[in-house]
Image (cartoon, rainbow, N blue to C red):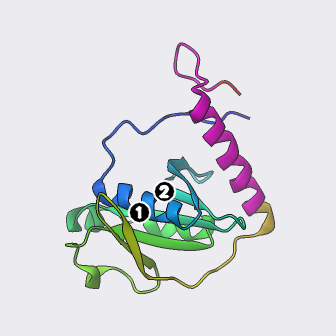
Amino acid sequence: MHVSVELPSRPIPLPQRGAIRHLQALGYATLTEFPLKSGRRADILALSPSGEVWIVEVKSCLADYRSDRKWHEYAEWCDSLFFAVGPEFPQDVLPSDVGLLIADAYDGEIVRHPECVPVSAARRKALTLRFARLAALRLNGQEDAFGAAIS
């Protein structure tokens, strides 16, 4: 099994940083740019102490939200799907069935929880194992000279 170990190469948007800090304060472990089997990448995948899986889609501005229509595909890969946006983001444009986390560079706050729709046990296990492997590979920096992951 080959797991990509690519680290995020772009600066972290401020709402993402605050969202990560808030999730970690709640006890969640987080990874950014988490590759899904669908070929998409979740901005943040968060794993609770009990194994619940959240995906947080970070939107830095209204133009970012309007140009990105792939976010709805993430729902099948998590128990709960959230948007993380800055305090100045126009919240009324976001769908009401997705969770909402307002964040800045320092912290965040969940202002709306979505309905939790549990993923299947098999998908949860696969996501959890992928999370663990990717975290370990990133932590250890196990890449060969050409940037390919060592499996």
For label 2, the residue is 44
Locate the N terminus by quadrant. Answer: top right
Looking at the picture, which amino acid does disc 2 mark?
A: Ile
- What kind of element bears circle 2? strand
Compared across the picture, whether 75 is left or right of 3 comes to: left
User: Residue shown at 73%/62% (left/top)?
Assistant: 124
For label 1, the residue is 19
Looking at the picture, which amino acid does disc 1 mark?
A: Ala
Q: Is 146 contained in the magenta span?
A: yes
> Residue 50 at x, y = what percent?
72, 67
User: Residue shown at 65%/37% (left/top)?
Assistant: 136
> Residue 10 at x, y = what percent?
33, 40
Q: CA distance from mark 1 to mark 2?
A: 9 Å
- What are the residue bounds of the magenta stretch? 124-149
- Residue 149 versus residue 103: which sits nearer the camera? 103
- Residue 109 versus residue 121: which sits nearer the camera? 109
Q: Quadrant of residue 88?
A: bottom left
> Residue 47 at x, y = what percent?
62, 60
User: Residue shown at 61%/24% (left/top)?
Assistant: 142
